[in-house]
Structures are given as structure tokens and as C-alpha cells.
Image (cartoon, grey):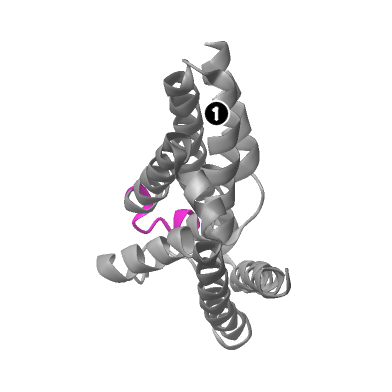
């Protein structure tokens, strides 16, 4: 169990940082739109990446750095586009969260956006595959327990964030709250994109 919790808390500490994926999950949770689907995609994606990292794929990324480069610039471009849309929404639209007036995005569009936030983010490769993968080597013979702990942290975090966000729903019945959220999301995306470009 010591190895399990080592993987759990290390993985949790990496996910907790405010990022584009977390902001998207939070936003969907507040709107109560496709929450189960979004949380499942994020958690399963993390599980795949963590498993690959522990299995040794992190060494491949270190050997072929162009993989990280493509992911970095592709992710930055996606984040810049999404940031622009968030700023536009913050300054030009009036959002009100009401039970009788929910606009649902299509399932396919939601899945595509979620996958882009997850798989076009180079930090997720560094955190899950390289960092967790390399640290797992310290637990020779107990890497399965370490992996299960790290994966459990992802499931715990994303489902807590997605379903916990609905408690903020009353606050977002005010248009001003949505404008502030869209602006913060846009700013978060922009900062991360610029960090990726100039790092």
C-alpha cells in the first residue's frame, strides 16, 4: 500500500496544477454537460499514458525529442484558438445558466475538444510518461502497485472536479460569473500557449 499511495499522491500533485484540461472539465461540470463522458475520457487517457510511461515509453520520448516538439507547437496552436474563442465569449456574449435553457454541444464535438485538450498537451507526456515513468523505476517489482495508485489519482481527481463543479451552478446563473469564468479560462489557455511557444 505504501507504493500505491506513493503513485497516488505523486500523480495527484501533478494533476492539481491549473491547466487547460482542468479548466475545460470544470466548465463542463458547471454546465452539467457530458460530465461522465468528459471525466471518463480524461481519466482513461491518463491511465493509458501512465501505463505507457511505466512500461518504458518515456525513454522513447527522451530518445526522439521531435515527438515532444510536435506536441508542443500543436498544443500551443490549439490553445491559442480556444483562448481567442473564450475571450470572444467573455466580451460579446451573455451567458446565463438556467435549467430550462441549456445549450448542449454535440457529443462528437465535446469528445473532439476533450481529446485535443488531453493529447495535444505536451505537459501531460512529460508528467505521466517521462516523470512518472522514470520514478516508477525506483519501485522495482512493485511497479503495478505504483501504476494503479497513479491511475486511481486521475480517476479520483477528474470525477471530483467534474461532479463537484455543479455546486457552483447557482453562482453561474449570473451572466457576470460566466464572463469572469470565460476570461479566466481564456487567460489560462493563453498563458499556457505562450509558455509552450517560448519555453
Give the magenta-colored segment's residue range: 28-36
Question: 90 or 58, which is in the foreground?
Answer: 58
Q: Is residue 8 visible?
A: no
Question: Where residue 48 appears, x then y in whole percent?
Answer: 38, 43
Magenta segment includes 29:
yes
The secondary structure type at the circle numbered 1 is helix
**Residue found at the very far bottom of the displayed protein:** 92
Farthest residue in the top direction? Answer: 1
Crowd tier of the residue under label 1, counting other residues whose Cα lies within 10 Å: few below 14, some 14–19, many 20 or above: many
In front here: 116 or 165? 116
Q: Is residue 89 left or right of residue 116?
A: right
Looking at the picture, how far across and down is residue 96, in whole percent?
A: 51, 71
Q: Nearer the viewer, residue 118 or 84?
A: 118
Residue that mark 1 sits on: 136
Q: Main secondary structure of the magenta part?
A: helix
The residue that appears at 36% across and 44% down in the rendered structure is 44
> Which residue is painted at 65% across and 53% down in the image?
18
- Provide residue 73's location: percent of width, then percent of height: 56, 74
Q: Pinpoint residue 172: horizontal percent, then vertical percent.
A: 56, 62
Q: Quadrant of residue 12?
A: top right
Q: Quadrant of the C terminus?
A: bottom right
Left or right: 189 with respect to 157? right
Question: Residue visible at 45% across and 45% down?
Answer: 57
Amino acid at each position: 500500500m505504501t507504493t500505491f499511495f506513493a503513485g497516488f499522491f505523486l500523480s495527484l500533485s501533478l494533476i492539481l496544477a491549473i491547466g487547460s484540461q482542468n479548466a475545460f472539465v470544470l466548465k463542463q461540470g458547471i454546465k452539467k454537460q457530458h460530465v461522465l463522458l468528459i471525466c471518463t475520457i480524461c481519466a482513461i487517457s491518463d491511465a493509458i499514458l501512465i501505463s505507457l510511461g511505466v512500461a518504458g515509453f518515456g525513454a522513447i520520448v527522451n530518445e526522439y525529442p521531435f515527438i515532444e516538439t510536435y506536441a508542443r507547437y500543436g498544443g500551443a496552436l490549439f490553445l491559442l484558438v480556444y483562448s481567442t474563442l473564450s475571450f470572444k465569449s467573455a466580451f460579446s456574449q451573455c451567458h446565463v445558466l438556467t435549467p430550462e435553457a441549456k445549450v448542449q454541444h454535440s457529443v462528437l464535438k465535446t469528445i473532439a475538444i476533450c481529446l485535443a485538450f488531453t493529447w495535444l498537451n505536451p505537459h501531460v507526456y512529460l508528467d505521466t510518461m517521462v516523470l512518472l515513468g522514470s520514478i516508477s523505476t525506483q519501485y522495482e517489482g512493485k511497479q503495478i502497485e505504483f501504476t494503479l495508485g497513479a491511475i486511481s489519482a486521475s480517476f479520483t481527481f477528474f470525477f471530483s472536479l467534474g461532479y463537484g463543479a455543479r455546486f457552483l451552478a447557482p453562482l453561474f446563473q449570473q451572466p457576470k460569473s460566466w464572463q469572469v469564468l470565460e476570461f479566466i479560462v481564456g487567460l489560462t489557455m493563453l498563458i499556457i500557449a505562450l509558455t509552450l511557444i517560448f519555453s
